[in-house]
Amino acid sequence: MALPADKDWWRQAAIYQIYPRSFKDSNGDGLGDVNGITSKAKYLKSLSLDAVWLSPFYPSPLADGGYDVADYRNVDPRLGTLEDFDAMVKALHKENIRVFVDIVPNHSSDQHAWFQEALASKPGSKARERYIFRDGKGKDGELPPNDWVSHFAPSAWTRSTNPDGTPGQWYLHLFAPEQPDFNWDNREVQLDFIKTLRFWSDRGVDGFRIDVAHALKKDMSKLNKSYPKIDSFGITLKGNDILFDRDEVHEIYREWRKVFNEYNPPRVAVAEAYIQAPRRVLYARPDELGQAFNFDLLGAPYDARTYKRIVSENIELAKTEGSSSTWVLNNHDQVRQPTKLGLPKETKLNEWLLSDGKDAVLDKKLGLARAKAAALFTMALPGCVYIYQGEELGLFEVEDLKHQDLQDPIWSRNIVTKRESAFFKGYGKNVKGVAVVHVDKGRDGCRVPLPWTITGKSFGFGSGGSHLPQPRWFKDFAVEAQSGQKDSTLEIYRQALASRKKYQSTEDLMWEKTGDPQVLHFKRANGWHCIMNFDGDAYSLPKGEILVSSGKLSGNKVPKNTCVWVKTIA
Ligand code: GLC
């Protein structure tokens, strides 16, 4: 069933990210699946969402949680079938919830048929031209073509093996070796992705999240240039870096836009481009993807001035490019906010995780209060809000996952020798008796399967176990534990999302003077006020109806670490 043809529905939507393997398991194999999502359509409806975005559910060897795609136009048999997918879209559309899928165009899995064909083919062949193969350096090509590094350290090059077993050319991968980068100068690659976009659009998919959208085009004429450190956020505002944010990449998205516009309503898209705001918004232009994730609040310090600056800047930038801003506090790559905001300011998150949460004391009450307040604050802003599964339950990061349970390549690949580890003060001190030391715990702690019920082997996630172990404290955060409990995080989210839908109007806000640098107060059209007290004195509310509050009020005053929405007569 198609949804009404409102072409601007996404501009101020509430979109919920589902990490399919960890959402709901319908067949007891410990992995969340497509039918699991379908079975929770009513739950998603109870959150007043406009859409869900599904992280990859495609066939994948899971070298990077599914962001290593072996077949872009299919469903991983462990997660379901294409028929299950169609049934899910139908069930969600019935509840007026649209569906985004994740497109991973920078790289495929090394198990993708094209990469296997490339390995079996000769250097310079058509099959190799779909990826980025180069000869190695040194006498026998035994050294990588250059010093470029990958996000999942160390080298961005891996040597391939020829069909006869001898060492062959090297191929480029900005992520894990199991994720070879495509050659986006190749028309066949370009056309194949257009085929994928049409394939899912024809099945009723409403939108696409574009993975590492800023990395597709590389300047391979600069092979001799050193690139020893990878940090796309650190590149200049001029763009055109060797590996990131090159002007040519926009041609790809202009072509995609034409495809999106073949549909009614036009398909929408959001760019994941981890670069600075003024460059990031270029991906959101109306003749390109239309929207880009704004990650500026993800790692922002909990501070009113910083929040205000980020909000004003992003609203302005989005407007200049003809888009609306987005607001993101959590996703599957980030430490969950209640943990971030409950740790002492000076805590180094990575070190804390490597210590299994022993390095510093997490103030759970404070962290959750701040996370709820920050969530309400962003939900009141003009633009589109993205919510990550489990955020509505107030879940903390699972900081003490055992090493043997970790799945993220960031954990397994970021290793140094014991000797080198002297430079990484404090890292890896729990790792005993091994020749190497892990220097990054990775992202599994925010990907642990959701707790649905208070009891049961995996708290209602499924009838079997759970592919990442859930801690005991998850039961207190279960949907069952919170549903109908007036002040629970879940009910606050439900109330906020429902009010937001009701009062959302023009894409503007007006800041009100508060006289306290740690209190922000803004007004939307319709007399909808949002007041957030970060760390200031209790602040008097304007007269009106209280729509929702992230925490307890003292009389008509908002205490610190609290956000409140008030409706006044407009
Ligand atoms: C994006 C995804 C992340 C993945 C990476 C490589 O940043 O969000 O999870 O590891 O791309 O595809």
Image: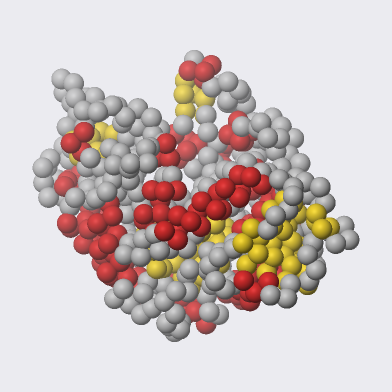
Give the x, y percent position of residue 339.
67, 44
Residue in front for this viewpoint, 22 or 365: 365
Q: Is residue 501 left or right of residue 4?
A: right
Q: Where is 191 relative to 568, above or below?
A: above
Q: In this view, does 22 lie to the left or right of 72?
A: right
Where is residue 513, by image quadrant?
A: bottom right
Q: Which residue lies at the image location 17% right of the left edge and 32% below the top edge?
A: 135
Q: Which residue lies at the image location 42% right of the left edge and 45% below the top edge?
A: 275
Give the x, y percent position of residue 469.
62, 49
Q: Which residue lies at the image location 53% right of the left edge and 67% below the top edge?
A: 507
Instruction: State which quarter of the image contains the C terminus.
Output: bottom right
Q: Is residue 561 left or right of residue 43?
A: right
Give the x, y percent position of residue 95.
55, 80
Q: Residue furthest right?
A: 555
Residue in front for this viewpoint, 372 or 141: 372
Q: Which residue lies at the image location 37% right of the left edge and 71% below the top edge?
A: 267
- Is residue 62 visible in the rendered structure shown here? no
Q: Where is 77 relative to 340, above or below?
A: below
Where is residue 124, by image quadrant?
A: top left
Residue in front for this viewpoint, 556 or 176: 556
Give the x, y percent position of residue 195.
26, 67
Instruction: State which quarter of the image contains the N terminus.
Output: bottom left
